[in-house]
Amino acid sequence: MDRFVFLTIDGLSRGAVYAAFALALVLIWRAARVVNFAQGAMAVAAAYVAYTVATATGSYWLGFLVAIGAGLLLGALVDRVVMRHVDHASPLNPVIVALGLVLLIQAVLGMVYGNEFRPAEAPFSRSALTVAGVAVLSPYDLFVFAAIGVVVSGLAWMFARTPVGLRMRAAAFAPEVSRLLGVNVGGMLTLGWALASGVGALAAMLVLPTELGLHPHAMDLVFVSAFTGAVVGGLDSPPGAVVGGLVVGLLLSYVSGYAGSDLTPLAVLVLLLAVLLVRPGGLFAPVAARRV
Amino acid sequence: MVLAAGVLLVGVSYAVEPFRNFQLATVAAYLCATAGLTVLTGLNGQLSLGHGALMATGAYTVALCQNAFADRGMTGGWLLPISLTAAIVSTVAVGAVVGVAAARLRGPYLAGVTLAVAVVVPALAVTFDGVFNGEQGLSVPVEPPPLALGPYFPYERWQLWLTGAATLLVLLLLANLIRSRYGRTFRAVRDDEVAARLAGIHVARTQVLAFVVSAATAGLGGALLAVLAQSVSPGAFSLTLSLFLLMAVVIGGLGRLAGAVWGAVLLVALPDLTHSVTELLTLSPAVAQRLEGNLPLAIFGLTLIVVMIAAPGGIQGLLSGLGRRLRARRS
């Protein structure tokens, strides 16, 4: 039972990160109809910037803030410099360009920092506090929950309650009409990319200390897990992405706890295939109109 | 055409030094995989990021077969074709499973699933290290060239003959497939699924067929690569390899076999080229080491983005455009 509680908490903590990452994927998918396969590489790049700043200044928090800023900037840059110019006629094109970005970013990181693991420090202790003899939560888990909670509710508030959020939703839902009504559709798209990439950078900062450390490929498996989370929830649904991310985190935690951590990649693949074959629109999709 | 290419290949194999022979053989092995991928992605419109994993399937099958033969003390030139066939069969089986799933998926979903396959399959080799020997991988015992060719026949030339013959056969079959009824149904499904269905084409079956054909060639390519390197390890079949293959067919020109040739040549030539460039520059060993592995990757990534934005037809598209313009000027 102790073990189950521990695995559940650990899974939720991991799942929260996947949820944030999946949310970032959904943000871009809703805004631009592109699954950003370069998200993992972009997030790692932001984390490397944080690493440089943190080692230069000795302050984790300064690095943390810089990472988020770098993430926002990188997202806007990728949209303005690259994605804006891609022909979206075939859905293959943006995916291929994103994969080119993956190679480019990872190679540049490898050239600057080398292809070895670097330690990623955690700002709080990762050893769990015990409540009534049961190891429950570590301060770091609390930090993860708080950070993700703030970001997710902040985004929800922004989209539902602010004029900017309304414009972003309008630009994504009906670009032509919103342009006629005076919405800067291109600017909203760039903002969407920046926000998503910033959330991705936050997720990378939170997940890297719990894994092997910084490496150009460190987010590959996280990306696959988060993509699975986004698909479980349905690519079109932000709440679905959060729930899907948590589900994937729990599943991975149970599999690695009870069956061995080697099997987690396989578990992700099986879950992804199962969801796509049984319910391709995700668990939260509305019933689709009949396709001809 | 194939005969001419074969004669040319034999001629070249005598004309150039052994290391070039080995490089050409590697090009041929990659060409198997890129040709299959260009049929799948370019002609049938299905994006696969998992072809590196399919190559790994073929490579490990060959390694297991050859080791099994060697353990039983069996020798002979006829063993390798059997192992290669086994590799194709096993990849066809894996490809059929992935293909059935893929036929129900579109666009980013398909890319995501095949991406997961590419990340997961190399990890499996480490998980089941009893069979696949973990990160170290397996060695592939391969027979020396037959004695009939003389005692001093260079091994690299024999490798080129072997892979060249297999690849030319694959290209011949694929070229015929593209021109056949099946090739037309592939294209019809890519261009408009609803119209294809109205024309009486079974869309899902066509997609699975394209995936299986493509998987078979990828498996053969991986198997040939394993025979060339005489070893297999999960590191050689990482996600990067899958991205490389995709890159190669896109830069070469999607949907054209000639483009697949350009892509395969690039895959071997570019790392070689950057290696010689970094040797020319005088760099500290640490910097040189970092550059050597990553510079080709960066160039590939950048070229891919630029090609996708500026010239979606790839090298072959540019070449045929150039040819058309020349002909138009002459007439």
Image (cartoon, coloured by chain):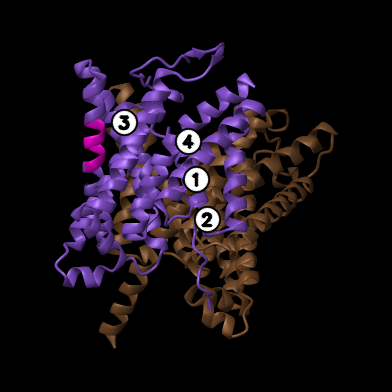
Image hue for chain B: brown
Image hue for chain A: purple
Are tags 2 and 3 found on a single chain?
Answer: yes
Looking at this view, name the residue that lies furthest to the bottom.
Answer: B331
Are tags 4 and 1 found on a single chain?
Answer: yes
> Dot 3 corresponds to which residue?
A47
Q: Describe the element under mark 4 as helix, strand or loop.
A: helix
Callout 1 environment at 10 Å: few (<14), some (14 to 19), or many (20+)?
Answer: many
> Dot 4 corresponds to which residue?
A15
> Which residues are the magenta region?
A66-72
**Sequence-earlier tag: 2 or 3:** 3
Q: Is residue A190 above or below residue B18?
A: below
> Dot 2 corresponds to which residue?
A282
The alpha-carbon separation of the residues under discs 4 and 1 comes to 8 Å
B143 horizontally vs A250: left or right: right
Identify the residue at image location x=23%, y=18%: A59
Are tags 1 and 2 found on a single chain?
Answer: yes
Q: Describe the element under mark 3 as helix, strand or loop.
A: helix
